[in-house]
Image (cartoon, rainbow, N blue to C red):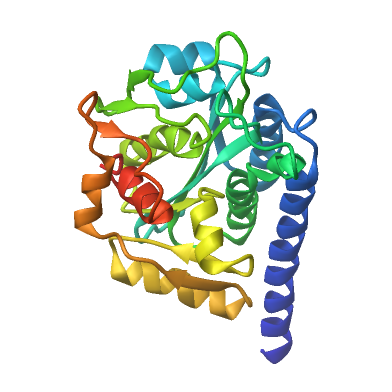
Amino acid sequence: THDQSNRNYLNRYTIVSEAINEARDLINEPGSVATPEYLAEASRKIAKEADLDVKVWDEKKLQKDGYNGLIQVGRGSAYPPRLIRLSYRAKKAKGHLAFVGKGVTFDTGGISLKPADKMFEMKGDMSGGAAVMYALKSIGKLKPDVNVTGIIPTAENFPDANAQRPGDIFYAKNGKSIMVDNTDAEGRLILTDGLHLAGEEKATHILDIATLTGACVRALGLSIAGVMGNNPQLTRAVIRAGQNHGESYWELPLPEEYKELLKTPYADLNYIGGPVAGALTAGLFLQEFVP
């Protein structure tokens, strides 16, 4: 009936709007409050409320399982890193979607320290992670016909005597060696772990959501998000979903030839591609960790 469909519509958007506001509240918390363990605790609470499965890797388990991106980035912080996985399983699933959200709870830049001006905004460097957590809360309540896994790698990027240095080299979870160039490009390091886990979870589609590069903001400004992908249908679906909700997305390319910019004599990959096309080289770097 007409009334019933109105009620369903209202119910759906109440669930989604509440989750959006809760995500914003989490994003606005200072870094001293919203630590990696705080995000893990919030995810456990979400799992209870929305009937999801939750698993959290602490620093010992991360070390044991070889999630070295998170270990590297979190080394300088008093608050150790976490890897969080929230799972929704449909009764009749058509496909398996994984969301991977960047959860850097505060980003000083590490040894490659950021300028002091507006550094306070870096409490929001876990916005991608928060978006994934509360997307899963909505999904758990709305029960769509698709399996969804939310993965939140979370760490705090701080300079101290244990912090990673520019020039350090380490092996990612998938066995590729990475040279650290500037420790302020930490987001892509923790995402290597998240993307690998998405592959291990047998996701058919992976969507990575992250406040990743200043280069993207310089290209598109503050009102438009950049989208890159190697699956044109999925990319178009994301852009379309944004149009329905007043969110503007613009597709950026993943040019094969720019992979040259990630070459280094010291490791399989340099994790920064130099001063130009920073958003595109970040996308190409991340693609190396999608199974």
Seen in the picture, residue 265 relative to 236 is either above or below; the reply is: above
Question: Front-most of 39 and 106?
Answer: 106
Q: What's the residue at 80%, 30% (across, down)?
A: 33
Q: In screen coordinates, is 33 left or right of 40? A: right
Q: Position of residue 291 (x, y in %)?
A: 25, 42
The answer to whether residue 88 is seen in the rendering is no
At 72% across and 40% down in the image, what residue appears?
119
Instruction: Please provide percent x and percent y for residue 25.
Output: 79, 49
Q: Is residue 215 visible?
A: yes
**Residue 200: percent from left, percent from top:** 32, 35
Image side of residue 70 versus residue 175, left or right: right
Quarter containing the N terminus: bottom right
Residue sitting nearer the eye, 31 or 174: 31
Q: Position of residue 62 (x, y in %)?
A: 46, 18
Check the image and report above or below for 104 versus 74.
Answer: below
Q: Is residue 192 above or below residue 74?
A: below
Query: Observer-nearest residue: 270 or 150?
Result: 270
Considering only vertical position in the picture, is 222 above or below 63?
A: below
